[in-house]
Amino acid sequence: MRPAPLRRVLFVQAIEKADADGEILPVPVRGDATREAARPLTRDSGETEQDRFFADRAGRLVDYLTSHRPALGSLVSPPHRLRYVVTTLLVAAVAIGWTTQALGTEKLVNILSFPLLGILAWNLFIYLLELGKGLSHLKRKPETTADELSAGPLTRLVEGSEKLPATFRDNPSDSDSPVALRQGLTDFQRRWRRLHEPVVTRRLRAALHSAAALLAGAAVAGMYAKGAATEYRAYWESTFFHPASLQSLLGTIFGPASTLSGIPVPDVTPLQRTAARPDVVGENAAQWIHLYALTIGIFVIVPRLCLGAWHTIASRRQEIAIDPRELPGTGLYFNRLLAEALGTALRTGAVAYSHALSPTAEGSLQRTLERRLSVPIKLDWQPALVLGDEDDAPGRLTADPESLPAHFALCFDFATTPEQETHGELIRGLRQALTEIDSETQLHVCLDAEGFDESRRNLADFPKRREERLDAWRSIAGPLRDDVTVFPPFES
């Protein structure tokens, strides 16, 4: 998905996740956006059409949000700081390269003191680093939860701090900036920056390679510009080199340029300045300048431009290849949207503990969950659990993470007296196992009250007994105490 729609989709997803009560995005507004965006969608639609649906729906909800809170517009739009950083870097490279004294400040040029020799050495070092990074990347395992972490320094430099603008910072008295909105914005910014960090890194590397090519090219151009107005003469002097060894070294360095241009590497013997020959004025440096320029082109400019182009193409492919549905903790969100848009049944896992549901109870459970989730569901029943399965059941039910449903119903007999050591332990263990695989997978504690209601309905204190039993179940449900589902619903 391209960056602009991807950013809107993740923005809306973060807001909806934080805004469970519909304070910021009312539920009717979400439903209208889903229905309007789903008009072209069919059950045979492929991933491209589904992506278009997600993007269209997110765009409608972003329009709603920005119309009510205009300040959100600046957060939804992708930041453009990277392009300014790249432009500044390229301009600086040209300026530095042009002003580099590649031929030295005097009219005599020591062929061993060219700054261009340093440029060659530095670039060869960079190529070794690139090779090392490429090899390490092949061996490195992908980090499936990387997008949940804080962004690195490169991303913060290019895309700014993760700190919210002053308009949305914590202010308990500000009704226009509720806690859910601030939480959603914080989660979105953190996820986007960490998710986008590999792309930013690639683009910066592309910019650095391009800048290096421009710097070298500008240095060569400056060298020719100075040489056109002044005669430079070449010589050399060295403590360590002798004419034969230096001739061999320069023949190796300039060999490719000499072969391509037909310019032979000049004899260095008459150019040597020694204590016995302090007045050597050398020869016209034109051939050396040509050989240096061609060598820089072969070993610096062309490779750097190729590396820059490769990183640019790779960053674009990397960015477009980001699939929001494959990000950790988002599968439930997108599955629910598709089920709501197409009216298809959302697969929901179900398992009963020490209890067998009647066909009537199964139908009641399905209807109750459909009302709760606002989408059609299909119950996928797993083999029933029995007393003693509390420790092994969580691992068994989550053994295949790839096929894990977005929702899971754990069913108990409402008539049973709940116990922390069995029922509570099973709830905690299964919830933890599901959360470790996908933080958005929802566990529903479901209580079959069919038998309880039939045996006690005629009692005078039936409503009170039912409420007391429900309180007992809630007390062992832990964090899910407020989400306990009883079916069939109580009818007074």
Image (cartoon, rainbow, N blue to C red):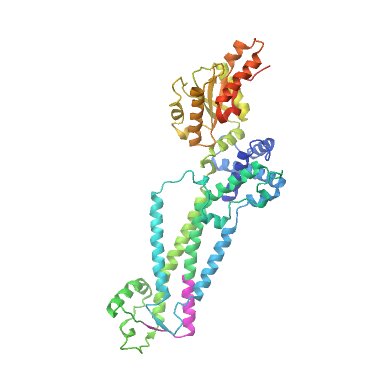
Magenta stretch, main secondary structure, is: helix
Q: Residue 108, relative to residue 207: is it above or below?
A: below
**Residue occupying the point 49% across, 63% down:** 208
**Image quadrant assignment for residue 243:** bottom left
Residue 179 point in image, percent of width and height: 65, 42
Pick out the residue farthest to the left: 244
Q: Position of residue 204 (x, y in %)?
A: 51, 59
- The residue at the point 44 percent across, 68 percent down is 301
Residue 324 lies in quadrant: top right
Look at 58% across and 36% down and name the residue there: 338
Residue 78 inside the magenta-drawn segment: no
Q: Does 319 sit left or right of 243 as displayed? A: right
Which sits in the foreground, 434 or 290? Answer: 434
Q: Is residue 172 left or right of residue 218?
A: right
Q: Is residue 275 above or below residue 331?
A: below
Residue 404, visible in the rendered structure: no
> Which of the 4 image quadrants contains residue 262?
bottom left
Tell me where residue 319 appears, x and y as whole percent. 52, 51
Q: Is residue 407 at all visible to an observer of this figure?
A: yes
Magenta-drawn segment: 216-235
